[in-house]
Image (tube, rainbow, N blue to C red):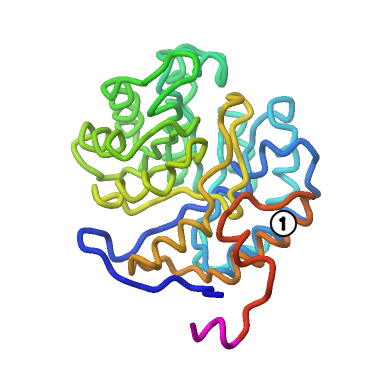
Amino acid sequence: MMREPYRIPAAGLPERVTIYEVGPRDGLQNESAIVPVEVKAEFVARLAAAGHRVIETTSFVHPTWVPQLADASELLAGLERVPGVRYPVLVPNQRGLDRALEHGVREIAVFASATETFARKNLNRTLESQFEMFEPVVARALDHGLTVRAYVSMCFGDPWEGPTPAGQVVAVGRRLLDLGCSELSLGDTVGVGTPGHVSALIEAFGGPSRLAVHFHDTYGQALANTLAALQAGVTVVDASTGGIGGCPYAESATGNLATEDLVWMLHGLGVETGLNLESLVETSTWLAAKLGRPSPSRVVQALGTAPATDQDVKE
C-alpha cells in the first residue's frame, strides 16, 4: 500500500502552506462525551510532535455554551509548550480575554458571523451589534501585544438564509481587519461552497492578502474548495486532525476538513507543509480509540489500519 502520494508539482500554487490546526478546539468542541483534560494535553503534544506550528488549543467560552471546553484553564496551565509552536485560543468576550491574559496566551481568535440569523443563534447579537463584543476585545488584546485572528462563519451559505451575498461577507470581514485583526479565516460552516464560489469570494476581497480558509466537508467539497483557494493565492488553511468537529449551533455542520486528507493532497502537489503524515495518522488512530469511534478522514481509514513497512515507504 502506498503511504505517501506520488509528487507531481502543479503550477500556480504556493510553495508552502501553513495548516492552522483546529482539532483540539473546533474538533473536540462538538463531542458529547467529555474528553479528559490529560487526553487533550496529549493530543496537543502529539500534534506538535507531528510538525504543527499553529495549534488552536481551546476556547474561553462559558461552560454552559460549550461544556467540552470547560477545562480550558486546566489544560493551558499544564500544557508543555514547544518552542516555535503557536498556541492560540478562541476568546468570545472581555472575560475570556481576561482569562487568556492570566494564562500568558499570546495569540487569540474572535468569532463573527456573516449572517443575521447565525449571529443571533451563535452570539445572541444582531449582525451589527456583534461588533460591540469584538471591538473592545480586539483593542485591549492589541494593547497587550497579542496577535488577533478573526473567524467569519457562514461565508458561503446559511441554512436559514440560503446563499450568503459576497458583499455582506466582505463588509463583515473588512470591518474585522480594520479593527486590527492580522488574519481573517473565511468559514464554510455548513460545507455548501464550491470552487467557483471560493474563487469569487476571494476576488471580492480584492485578493488573498491576510485571508485564510476554513472548510467543512458536508457535501464532499472541502479539498476542491481548498485547491481553488490555493490557486487564488491563499497560503493558510484550517484543518482538524482526523476530520473531527462541527458546529454546536448549526446541526447541518459536519466535520472539518481532515488534516491528513489535506496533507496527502498538498504533498502530492509538491506543496510543503512541514507535517509528518505517518505521525498524524497515528495520532488520529489513537484519538479515535479515545473517542470510541473511527476517524472520518479517508487517509486515516486507508493508512490507519496497518503500520508502515519498509516496502510501503519505498513505494
Q: Is residue 131 above or below residue 17?
A: above
Locate residue 267 relative to residue 241 in the image: left or right: left
Q: How many marks?
A: 1
Q: Is residue 62 above or below residue 257?
A: above
Q: Position of residue 91 (x, y in %)?
A: 56, 35
Q: Position of residue 181 (x, y in %)?
A: 37, 38
Q: Nearer the viewer, residue 72 or 65?
A: 65
Q: Is residue 315 above or below residue 297?
A: below
Residues packed near mark 1 inside 10 Å, few (<14), some (14 to 19) or many (20 plus): many
Locate residue 284 relative to residue 134 in the image: left or right: right
Q: Is residue 213 above or below residue 236?
A: above
Q: Nearer the viewer, residue 138 or 234?
A: 234
Residue drawn at (40%, 73%) of the image = 6
* Quadrant that contains the N terminus: bottom right
In the image, the segment drawn in magenta is 310-315
Locate residue 164 relative to residue 59 in the image: left or right: left
> Tag 1: residue type?
Leu
| SS at circle 1 | helix
Q: Position of residue 28 (x, y in %)?
A: 67, 43
Residue drawn at (33%, 25%) of the image = 169
Is 144 inside the magenta-drawn segment? no
Residue drawn at (48%, 73%) of the image = 4
Residue drawn at (55%, 48%) of the image = 22
SS assignment for the magenta stretch, majority: helix
The residue carrying mark 1 is 287
Is 313 inside the magenta-drawn segment? yes
Q: Position of residue 146 (x, y in %)?
A: 46, 46
